[in-house]
Amino acid sequence: MWYHGTVEFIADLHIHSHLSRACSRDLRPESLYHWCQKKGITVLGTGDFTHPAWLAELKEKLVPAEEGLFQLTGELARSADGGIPDLCRAQVRFLLEGEVSCIYKKNGRVRKVHHLVFAPSFKSAERIGHRLSEIGNVKSDGRPILGLDSKDLLSIVLESADGAALVPAHAWTPHFSVFGSESGFDSIEECFEDLSPHIFALETGLSSDPPMNWRISGLDRVTLISNSDAHSPEKLGREANLFDCALSYPAILSALRRGKRAVEAGGPGRLLKTLEFFPEEGKYHADGHRKCGVCWSPKETLRHQGLCPKCGSAVTVGVLHRVEKLSDRPEGFRPKVAAGFENLVPLKEILGQVLRVGPASVKVGRLYDRLLATFGNELFILRQAEPRSLDAAGHPVLARAIRRMREGRTEVQPGYDGVYGVITLVAPKDFVADGQLSLF
C-alpha cells in the first residue's frame, strides 16, 4: 500500500464546519469527503474541533486510518461516492484542526488574533477543548472567541498533548491576525515571547503569497503554508499545500517543522510547494474603503494620510501595505532555500469568464462536471492538464486561459476592505477565431 511509504499529496489544513457562523450547512464529513475527491485533496483539516457537537459528529463519522489521520466510515463513504467521476475517485483523510480567536489587551493595545490548532488524536482534541471551555464559551461558534493571550493559548496546546501544534492563521488579515494592521503585532516574538520557538509555520492567507513574506527576514525560520479557510465545500483547495512525505500526522508536522532544512536536503519528507491565490484576488490585498469604492496602493494611502477622500473615514490598510511597512528586504527578494509556489484561479471562476456568466451559474456547473469526468479533478486540470488536450476536446478559450494563468499573464483588479479582487484571464478577442465566433 502506498500509504506506508512517501507520496506526493495535496493537503488543505484550514476549513470550518456547519457550526461556524456564516458557513454552509453542507460542511459535514460526507460532503467534505465528496468535494475533496472533486478537488484533488488527499488530506483535509476537520475545522472546529473545539466545538463539542462537531467533535462528537467527527467521532461518529470518522474512523482511524494512518497515524493521526482519519477516514470516513465505509457506509458513509460508499454513499458519498455517488456522483464522483471515475477519474476523480481517490482516498481522503482528515486531520483534526480548529481555529481559535483570541481577543485580549497587550502592550497597551487590543489584540485580535486567529490561530490554527492541530491535534494528533481525539483524546488530545478533547483535552484542548476542555481547557478552553474553562476559559470561555466554546459552544456558541465553531471558531470560539476567547479572552486569551495568544501565548497562553500556545501554552495550553503544548501542555495538552505531544504533537499538538499552533500556527498563526491568515497572518496578514487586517482585523484578525498576528500581523494585522488593525490589531496585530510587528513580529512573532512580540506576540509569543519566550514561546516563539514553538511557532514553526505561518499561514500566509489569501491576500499574500510567499514572495511577499520573503521580504521579512524574521520569517525565514518558519514554514509558509496556505489553506482555503473554506466556509463552503466548493471553496476547498482554493489554497493548499503539496507535500512529499508519508501519509500521517507526524510526517506532515515533521515536514513543516523541518522547513528549509527539508527543502535543502531534497528527497521526501518535505513541503514541496504551496498552491496560492493570486494575492491581488484576496479581499484585503490593497488599501481602501469599501463603502465609498476607494481602492489604493500604499503610496496613495500615504499621500492621502490614510483618509477616504469621500467621507473622511480612515481606510482599511491592506496586506500589501502592511508587508511594505514591516519588510527589511526589497521587492523581488528570494531566499536561497525556499519551497516553491503556484498561483491558481479556481476553475469555476475561469469557466465563468469563458462562458461569460457568473461562476455560480448552472452553465458553469454543467461544464465543470463534464471537465472533471473527462480530465480528472479540479487541481489536476488547473495544474497539469495539457492545454492542447483541452483545445482538442473543444475548449480552446479555456485552454488559453489556463495557459495564461500558469504563465502569470493576467489582468488584475485588486481586492480591498473585504471586496475580492478580480483576476482576468480571458479577453474579447479570445471569442473570435478566423472571423467566426468560437464554440463558446
Image: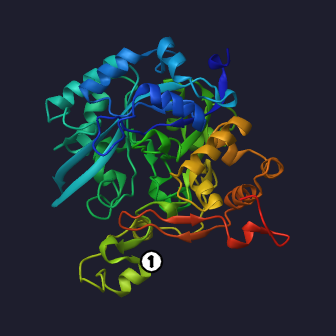
- Is 38 placed above or below 420 here? above
Residue ID at (26%, 29%): 51
- Give the residue at mark 1: 297
The residue lying at 67 percent from left, 63 percent from top is 408
x%, y% of residue 55? 31, 23
The residue at the point 57 percent across, 30 percent down is 42
Q: How many marks?
A: 1
Q: Is residue 383 left or right of residue 288?
A: right
The x, y position of residue 183, in whole percent, is 26, 60
State the image coordinates of residue 261 (x, y, percent, origin top left): 59, 40
Residue 334 occupies which quadrant of the picture?
bottom right
Q: Secondary structure at mark 1?
A: loop
Q: Is residue 369 left or right of residue 198?
A: right
Asked whether the viewer can see residue 66, the reply is no
Can the viewer see residue 112?
A: yes
Q: Looking at numbered disc 1 in the image, what kind of residue is underneath it?
A: Ser
